[in-house]
Image (tube, helix red, strand yellow):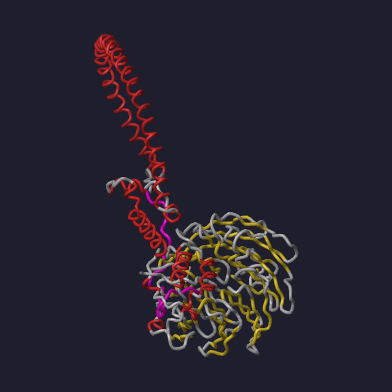
Amino acid sequence: MISISSSELNYLVFRYLHESGFTHSAFAFGYEAGIDKTIIDVNMVPPGALVTFIQKGIQYLELEANLSGVRILFCIQSDADMDEDFSFIQPLDLITKDPYELHSIVKAKKENQRQNKHESNKITNDLIQDNAREHVQELEKEKKERENEQGVEKMKLDKEREQEKCEQKELQHQDQNHAENHEDKTTVENLESKARGGPEPMEISQSSISLHNEIPSSDVKILEGHTSEVWTHLFLLVHGIHLVLFSHPGEYNDFIRKTHSFSGATYAGSGDSTARIWKIPDGPCNSCMHDEPVNVVVLRHFKGRTNEKSKDVTTLDWNADGTLLATGSYDGQARIWTKDGELKSTLNKHKGPIFSLKWNKKGDYLLSGSVDKTAIVWDIKTGEWKQQFEFHSAPTLDVDWRNSVSFATCSTDNMIYVCKVGENRPIKTFAGHQGEVNAIKWDPSGTLLASCSDDHTAKIWSLKQDKLIHDLKEHVKEIYTIRWSPAGSGSSSPNQQLTLASASFDSTVKLWDVELGKVLYSLNGHRDPVYSIAFSPNGEYLASGSMDKCMHIWSVKEGKIVKTYAGNGGIFEISWNKDGDKVAACFSNNIVTVLDFRM
């Protein structure tokens, strides 16, 4: 007899949760069920396998009930009759009831159906007879009325014919005079208009909407090498431009990105359990420098086997001076690499996948958040954990430093905690979201904290009060990520207005006035969920990437698209270089593109 093991069933449930969009539930279930240890060839499992399996099971139960005596109880009916009988039965009945109970259900429902049909037929027959009598009476009445009307109409027609002949002769005479006068008037008006230098009659354009300025292929550099989806990347400009990339499989979707404030590197991660550092030449993408092969350093997170799913990279971050790169993976380990690709240390304390990883500004501490519900601060000098914070009751989704010693964490438990190194309890607790909190970000000054959630809202908090400052409710679906503009106190543009951008599964990006808590612009250029947004270094432009395969660059001042690029896969991450003249985007078809931006 064919059987299914518990591990195989767990994998089907895991795939169902992920394919249905329950990403965090899939993460939690996959971790507890040990999906990363399965030996199943995932490429052999088709989409919707669990639903198909259940449907096949229900069909088998129907067949089993049929062969167990239900056909005999139904008096040896035909196959068509049997199909009709089973239409009375719900799938749950097939699972919970024996054949005799199924027979009783069908018999009772068929009897009710026959009674209803008999009553319906009786009512229908009575109505048909009444309608027939009324119809005969109406026909006789209509016949008499038509005979009377025909006589009257004949007299009217004769009289109208005589009048039409007279009117037609008069109209012909008037039209001839009117046409001559109109032609003379038109000629005079045109001559007067030309004499005054006035415009000639205008033609109305049928295509008044101008096309967006697409980025040409000559301004695009394509980076290939990953063998699975590329989920995140980061520019770091130190000496020239470096681009670091990592990817991981679709089952483990964590799209964490940070743009650094110096000369240039971008990284990316992928389901092939690697991160890659690309050295990109200076200058435009169409220059001769870009004709040479791109130098790449591969950071391998596995030894020996290349299909170790537990090693897939989920998040990464550069330190402030661009000398060290931290990566987090599904095995719960954080790794520190040099910019040349040398593994400096491995940080092992978490008991679940790492979802978020951030350096503090001084570069002496690294902060990590994990599905094991905790956040850990690591001492980089010693390579050991300094403090573990165990406040959340569910997986930690995001972390963000406020300064070099305090930070915030958020979780699927709907809570936000502000913590400080050395303190054993949160220094601030923010409660108010009604769904999983997907991301948190401090503003440049470190005084305001923004959060976004599956409850369709973004919120702004302050350490000076327990309740939120603004509740931003214009989105109609889950908000995936948020970004502050590089403006206001604590930024390089202190005199510019501070704004917040939010990206949602409702396909829109919204720009918010932070002081008033109102929408400045709703950017409606995408057709599918928006996963990533990034402000240019000068704050004048906002780049957005969506599952509709398009990247748009918007003018923050006007709320309009100024550049656009269409790739061949959904976009999971976008970031700018320091100078704001290049944008990188990672796609679901395993490639990363670097695009020149010029206005």
> What secondary structure predominates along the stretch shown in magenta?
loop
Q: On the image, which quarter does residue 453 sit in?
A: bottom right
The boundaries of the magenta stretch are 206-232
Q: Is residue 35 above or below residue 185?
A: below
Q: Name the foreground residue: 90 vs 454.
A: 90
Q: Position of residue 540 (x, y in %)?
A: 56, 66
Side of 440 where 576 appears, left or right: left
Q: Position of residue 584 (x, y in %)?
A: 47, 74
Residue at left 69%, top 79%? 404
Side of 448 where 275 appears, left or right: left
Q: Position of residue 168 (x, y in %)?
A: 26, 18
Q: Is residue 223 magenta?
A: yes
Residue at left 74%, top 76%? 424
- Report whether residue 463 is seen: yes
Q: On the image, which quarter does residue 166 sit in?
A: top left
Q: Is residue 439 magenta?
A: no
Q: Position of residue 564 (x, y in %)?
A: 44, 65
